[in-house]
Amino acid sequence: MGEHRFKIVFEGALLPGVDINTAKLNLAALFKTDVVSIERLFTGRPVALKRDLSQADAQTYLQALSKTGVEARIEAETPIELNLADVQDHSHAPANSSEPTSPYAPPRASVGEAVAEFATLKPFSFEGRIGRLRYLAWTMVLTLILLAVCSTFALIALGLISADSTAGLILGGLLALILFVAFAFVSIQITVQRLHDIGWSGWLWLLNLVPFVGSIFPFVTMIMPGNKAGNRYGPPPPPNSTAVKVLSSLWIVFIALMLIAMLKGGITAIQQEYESAAQSSYETSSVTTDEIDVETEPAPNSTGDAAEEPQRPVDSAKE
């Protein structure tokens, strides 16, 4: 009697505390294949991962699979029994039968539905992944909407102020606060998805609240490339559409307009400061000149009195 042979059977179960995406990535690395091929193993039906193993080899394979986070088991191979009746029955079996004709035949487990190659976009969610261009495009849409809403509220506020409506101003302020919180919430969701694309935890968004670090971290989020393959947060995002490319390129125009406005404002401020300094210098010079003229002007009749000779008394006897 020959040595007993064993096989490794897997039904899609995971070890406690293991994320399914992490397990799929580990299995893909172990079998040196892609995640899409590994998806076919998670159908819930028994699949023989390895056949015709000795007991020692089966234990080795089982330990390797345990390190990936999946739960498999060892089963004894069914011995081959030569039965002419079975052979006759199998010869008339349908060609499309899903059952293997031999225990050594390749597994034919159903793969279920085809897994999407790319992740589904979820703009209003903390789950999923988005790339750099899509992150810039979505934030540009939020920025344009925020500018339009702020302009509308500014016009309404001017009308309420001119109408002296205190109740209207309070209601408008509360509505503006609610909209601001909603926009901030959506912005956080988009940033978290961008962090997922890099392979980072979404909790790293809190670094934006740290002094000095918060002024640098947004640029890191925009510059860092994402994972090309699937990671623990799901498959890669779909390719960028033309609309995404156009919206993301609007940031160049937006930044250029801001720089031009800042430059123009700076030049205007410098010009006004120069004109103010020149006007002040001119007024100071005029005041000083007037004071000098007043001080150097001779007193009335001072020279004439000094030049006159004293009058002699008239001699009444000579008259």
Image (spheres, rainbow, N blue to C red):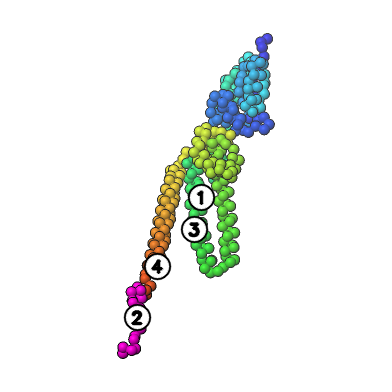
User: SS class of the residue under badge 2?
Assistant: loop
User: Based on the displayed image, in which of its 4 quarters is residue 108 positioned?
Assistant: top right
- Please say if the residues under marks 1 and 2 sit with CB atoms less than 8 Å apart: no
Q: CA distance from mark 1 to mark 2?
A: 101 Å
Picture layout, residue 63 above or below residue 232: above
SS majority, magenta? loop
Q: Provide residue 249's location: percent of width, then percent of height.
A: 43, 44
Q: Would you say residue 309 sits in the magenta stretch?
A: yes
Q: CA distance from mark 1 to mark 4?
A: 70 Å
Q: Residue at x 60, y 31 (%)?
A: 22
- Identify the residue position indicated by label 2 in the image: 311
Q: Kindly identify the amino acid type of the residue bearing the numbered disc 4.
A: Glu
Q: How many marks?
A: 4
User: Based on the displayed image, in which of its 4 quarters is residue 115 positioned?
Assistant: top right
Circle nearer the N terminus (3, 4): 3
Q: Residue at x 66, y 19 (%)?
A: 59
Q: Which quadrant does the N terminus fall into?
A: top right
User: SS class of the residue under badge 3?
Assistant: helix
Circle nearer the N terminus (1, 3): 1
User: SS class of the residue under badge 4?
Assistant: helix
Q: Nearer the viewer, residue 108 or 72?
A: 72
Magenta residues span 303-319
User: SS class of the residue under badge 1?
Assistant: helix
Query: Nearer the viewer's eye, disc 1 or disc 4?
Result: 4
